[in-house]
Each structure stands twice: as structure tokens, then as C-alpha cells.
Amino acid sequence: MSRTIFAVLAGPAAAGLLALVFPAQGAAQPVESAAISSTTAKAPVLHWRSGRGQSYLIPALEIPSFLLVLTMYDRTVYGQKDFGSTPSTLWHNINHAHWVYDTDSFSMNQFGHPYLGSMMYGFARSSGLSFVESLLYSDAGSLLWELGGEKTDPSMNDLIVTSQSGALLGEALFRMSSLTLERGDGDPGFWRQLGAAAISPPTALNRLLFGERFKTLFPRRNPSTYTSMQLTGNLQKSRSASGVTSDFNRRQVGVDFTMSYGLPGKDGYKYTRPFDYFNFKCTTISGSDILENIMVRGLLTGRKYESGDSYRGIWGLYATYDYLSPTVFRVSNTSLALGTNGQWWLSRRAALQGAVLAGPGYGAGGTVPAHGLRNYHLGASLYGLLSLRLIVDKALMVNVNLRAYDISGIRSPESGAAEMIARSDASITVPIYGPHAVGFQYVESRRYSHFPTYGGVYQKVGMTSVAYIFSFEPHFGAVEWRDGMASGNR
């Protein structure tokens, strides 16, 4: 798989997030009625609710063209050995494919591939297609790349991480790109359009190529959100009990972006479409592995529920994609999980938000190569999440998150291998003035692996952080619905 995927992502992504969280004043709302009544466009203007103006043909042409450009670039830069594919190699793979497990680097397989999938997903989604329809296009594009994009044998694990993980990442990016365009006074200006393009390039390309047809904004229905950005100073420490020597103290600087979209509790908000609720988190740090984590979870289908006047929540089937790289070992996982998340008013001023999820998936985990050890292990997995956030009006926020990944030897090139990885973090945020706050956080990651060839390895990484935090919603995103108080974010 091409290493150039990172070049597509690097640089403008930060500008996109800044445009999302630093919008112009006011709010431009999607006006679907105007789209239907348009008579000047040569093709029907996209209307999201009815499907008028959507196109199945455009992404069917865009995705192969995108893959063709990508493989031609790879062929020019990296040579013919892996990328000299021809119609004859495509035909051979269709008829005599020998499916294998990809041996690309961890970062390329577990993040580069999903980002490629998010691009293919984005071409379909921004053409007016639904979540499921766009996922099918991402599936088809992933299969086409495996069979015809490279000369190497097609990879079965890439079909999961490229298309399935890519669709989850792509939907979150599509929604945040649309939100960037929506926030502002009147038509989006240059900076908001540039920011939206950085977040979801396929969406921007279709808006540019097809003019008014795909410029109708996605109807987000005004969800409750919580968005924050923080600049952190980290002191990272690690030690290994066995197998790998990796003791160190390292000072790093990091940037963290978090968005919760569709928080439960708002009157009138409905969860009728996949990802009407989602949580997105991305953290970058200084050093060789710039991307420390990217985590996406979204509700695919579910229902609202409540208990009295103090608790409201949603439950159902969620999909998750996690990529974590805490310096000395790494884990990635894509899963379907049953679960719930909600908010409970403990008192007039204090609220507790939380989420509990568990389910099967497919993951990868492993150490950074040392002493000849294999980089990572693939296999069917079990995933679990417990997340709690205590909000005390404007005075305090406390976060605790626990994640666990059990990666087995099932559907793996290494039978009998196992990875058990746990990630926990706790933080306290204290406001200083207005949206400005200071935070203190401790993150700990643990890994225990067992391979038949060399036994068990235990690793642990701890990181302490001090952060400047800018919160974009008041009261840290607590949702208010109680009698006599305003609905939505307070």
C-alpha cells in the first residue's frame, strides 16, 4: 500500500480542524427547499431528504480514477516491483488470487489504509448517497485496489481496515466538514471552505467540480455538541517487565482535538441515521510517531430512553475504530459493539455523562520492533469501553476512560498468538476565564502478548500531561432539558 497516503493527509488537516472550531459569527443553515426549487442548475440540485440530485455514477467513476492516479504515482516514485500492475495482473488476481495477510508497516496498514478508505467513502457520501451505500462503494474500491492496484498478492485484512474502518473515519470527517461549512454568516468564505476541504477532500472536490449540484449542506438537525482543543506538555515514562528493554523519560509537546456530536438529552433531536451520535478524538505528539491516537465511535442504530427527569440516554449498536501508538507498542481495532451512553443530572449543577460498550471486532497489536520481535499481530478481537465525565457547572470537569482490547489468534497468520492491551486515562479540567481552562492528565497503556515462538512480553507506558484547553461549548457540553431551564447545551 502506498506510503503517499500520508502526504494527502499531512499539512492541511490542522487548518481544517481550526476552521471547524473557530468559525465566523452566525450560522448558515442548510436550506433544502431552495435546492428543490432551483431551476438554473443543469442537473438537479442535491436534496438530502428525498434523494433528488444524488448520483451513483459519479463516485463509480471517481473512485477508480483516484486509485489509478495513486498507483501511477507509486509506480513512478517507488518502481515497478510492487506497483507495476497491468490489466493482466488484475485478471490473474480475479481468477487465481492468493489471498494473504498484508505485511506493510503498522502505521500504513492500520491508519494509512483506513484513510484511503475514508477518501473512497467520501466520494460516494458527498454525492448524496447514504451511509450504507457509501460503505458499499468503499468496499468495492478496496477490492479493486487489492486486485489491481498492486502487483503483490491481495490482502484479506486490508478489506476490513480499508473499507470498514475507512467508512467510520470517513463519516466522522464528512460530518465535521459539513459542520465547518455550516458555521458562519451567509455563504462559507475562503477559510471555511479551505478548512472543510482539509477535513474531507472528496467533499470539497465534488463541490468544486459540480458547482451548485452538491453544495447543499448536509442537514445536521442542530445536535448538542462538545468540542475542545488542547495544547499539552507531556512527560512520558515507560518500563518493561520482560522481553523488551525500553526504559526512558521523554518530554513531548502534543495537540489534542475532541468532538462529541449528538449528545443525548436534547429535546426533539432524533437518532435516525448512522452517526447521528459520534465521538471523535485525535492526538498528535512531537517525535517520530506524530499520530499518537485517533479514535472514532458512532451509533449505527438505536433508540433514546430516559429515567425520570434526571437521566436521558441512547442505546443500540455502535461501530468503533481506534488507532493507538503509545511509543513502545501499538494497537488498532475495528469493532461492532452493543452499548449505551447518556447523561445523569446528579444535582442542579452537577452532571455525569458516560458510555459503556462491548463487542467483537478485528484488531492488530504489537511492539515497536526490537530484538528481532515481530512488529504486530493480527486477529479477531474483543473490545470494551467505559467512559465517565463528571461536570460541575463551570467549575470543574473530571474524565475517566478505560479501553481494553483482546486480540486472539483467530483469523490470524500466527495461530496461538494473543495480545491483551488496556488503556486508561484520568484528567481534571479547571476553567480559568471564559472558554480557557487548564488541565492535568495521566494516561497509562499496558500490553501483554504471548507468542508460541518466544513466550510472553509485558510492557507499560505512562504519560503525565499539563494542558491549556479551549472549550467551545459552555458548561463542558452538559445538556440541559429539565423543566424551567433552556434545552440543549447550557
Image (tube, grey):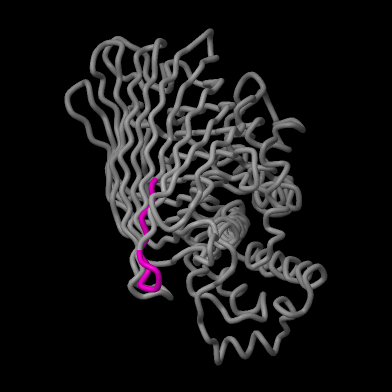
> On screen, 478 above or below 7?
above
Check the image and name the residue furthest to the right: 76
Q: Quadrant of the C terminus?
A: top left
The answer to whether residue 380 is visible is no
The percent coordinates of residue 376 (x first, y second) are 48, 63
The count of marks equals: 0
Question: In x, y percent, where is residue 197?
Answer: 69, 43
Q: Looking at the image, is 166 positioned above or below residue 160?
A: above
- To which quarter of the image does residue 417 belong? bottom left
Taken as a whole, is the magenta stretch helix, strand or loop? strand
- Horizontal placement of 250 versus 388: left or right? right
Residue at coordinates 75% horizontally, 48% vertically from top-left?
Answer: 208
Q: Nearer the viewer, residue 132 or 237?
A: 237
**Which residue is drawn at the image coordinates 64% and 38% (left, top)?**
286
Q: Is residue 453 magenta?
A: yes
Figure quadrant of the N terminus:
bottom right
Rendered view: 477 above or below 255: above
Q: Is residue 119 magenta?
A: no
Residue drawn at 46 percent across, 59 percent down: 366
18 left or right, relative to 388? right
Q: Nearer the viewer, residue 289 or 456?
A: 456
Q: Residues in magenta? A: 446-455
Residue at position x 44%, y 65% from top?
A: 377
From the top left corner, tell me how far across and down residue 283 is, in percent. Answer: 55, 38
Work out whether residue 398 or residue 224 is closer to the camera in this orientation and state it.
Answer: 398
Where residue 429 appears, as percent x and y from the top left, is 44, 19
Residue 368 position (above or below residue 16): below
Res. 382 visible in picture = yes
